[in-house]
Image (spheres, rainbow, N blue to C red):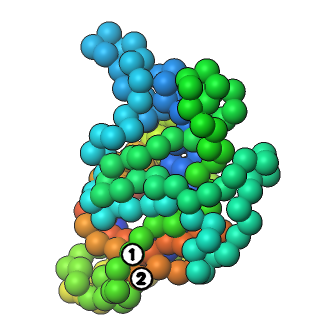
Amino acid sequence: CPGVYPVIFSGAALGDLLIWLIFNLDARAADEGRSFMSRTDETGKPVGNRVGEKMFSPLVQMQRYPGHPLLQLETFSSSGLSNHYLEVIKDGVPQTLSYSRYWATQNGKQPTGYMFPVVMEGSEQSLADLIAQTERAILVNRSWYVRYVNPRTLEMTGITRDGTFWIEDGKIAYPIKNLRFNQVLPDMLRDVDAVSKVQRYGDSVLPGLRVKAFNFSSVTDSV
C-alpha cells in the first residue's frame, strides 16, 4: 500500500537517486535561490548557500575521488578542469559546491567542475546484515523514470524495478508490486540510519543504505 516506510536501498538503487543530488550541488543555482542548497531570508530573497550547515545524517560522507582504488579514473573532466579530490559532504555537512569558470570568476572562487566521480563511504556490514537488523522495511533494488516534481526542493518521483521486496523480522518475506515514490532527496539523506559495504557502480563507489522514512505514492503495474 502507498505510505511512508523504512526502506533499504541497494547501492545500485542509491546511485539511481544520488546522481540527481550531485547534479544539483551547483553554486550558481544555490546563490540565486533556485536550489535545495539555497539560503533565503524571511522574505524568500536568496542570501547565499547552505555550505557548512548540518543537513544530512552524519553517516553521509561523500567525496569526489577519481583516484579511489575501485575507480582509478582520469583526473581531468570533459571541461578541462582538474578532477582532483574534494570533500563534498562530511559528517552530514556540505563542504563545497560545483563552480563553473564563470560563476567562480564572479565570486572570487576557484572553478571546480562537477562533483563526479562520487564516492560515498560505507561500513563493514553487508546488505544482508542491514536486512537482518531490520524489523520491517521495503527493499528496493533499482529505480527508473526518475524525474523532478519540485527542482527547488529536489522532490523527485520514480518507480522501483528489478525486484521490490517486503522485509519482516530480519528476512526477505515476499516480493511486492513495484511502487511509485514522491520523495524529497535531502530528507532521504537526513534519515539515513545505516550503511553497508561499498561497491563500484559505473563511475561511482556507493554503499547500500537504510532510511527511516521514504514516501511511496502509489502502486504500479510496471515490471
Q: Quadrant of the N terminus?
A: bottom left
Asked if 215 appears above or below 67 in the picture, the reply is above
Q: How many marks?
A: 2
Asked if 182 appears above or below 175 in the picture, the reply is above
Asked if 77 appears above or below 36 in the picture, the reply is below
Task: Tell me if label 1 and label 2 are in contact, CB under 8 Å.
Answer: yes
Q: CA distance from mark 1 to mark 2?
A: 5 Å
Q: Quadrant of residue 212?
A: bottom left
Identify which residue, 57 or 108, lies in the foreground. Answer: 108
Q: Residues within 10 Å of mark 1 (few under 14, many from 20)?
A: many
Q: Amino acid at mark 1?
A: Gly
- Earlier in the chain: of badge 1 and badge 2, it is 1
Q: Amino acid at mark 2?
A: Lys
Q: Which mark is residue 197?
A: 2
Q: Which mark is residue 122?
A: 1
Taking the image as shown, residue 20 lies to the left or right of residue 3, namely right
Identify which residue, 206 or 221, lies in the foreground. Answer: 206
Identify which residue, 193 or 131, lies in the foreground. Answer: 193
- Which residue is at a point 55% across and 23% down the rendered structure image? 107
Q: Which mark is residue 106?
A: none
Q: Quadrant of the C terminus?
A: bottom right
Q: Quadrant of residue 211?
A: bottom left
SS type, badge 2:
strand
Percent position (x, y) of residue 164? 46, 75
- Which residue is at a point 59% across and 80% down the rendered structure image? 69
Percent position (x, y) of residue 108? 56, 26
SS type, badge 1:
loop
Q: Quadrant of residue 170?
A: bottom left
Taking the image as shown, residue 136 lies to the left or right of residue 118, namely left
Percent position (x, y) of residue 204? 59, 68
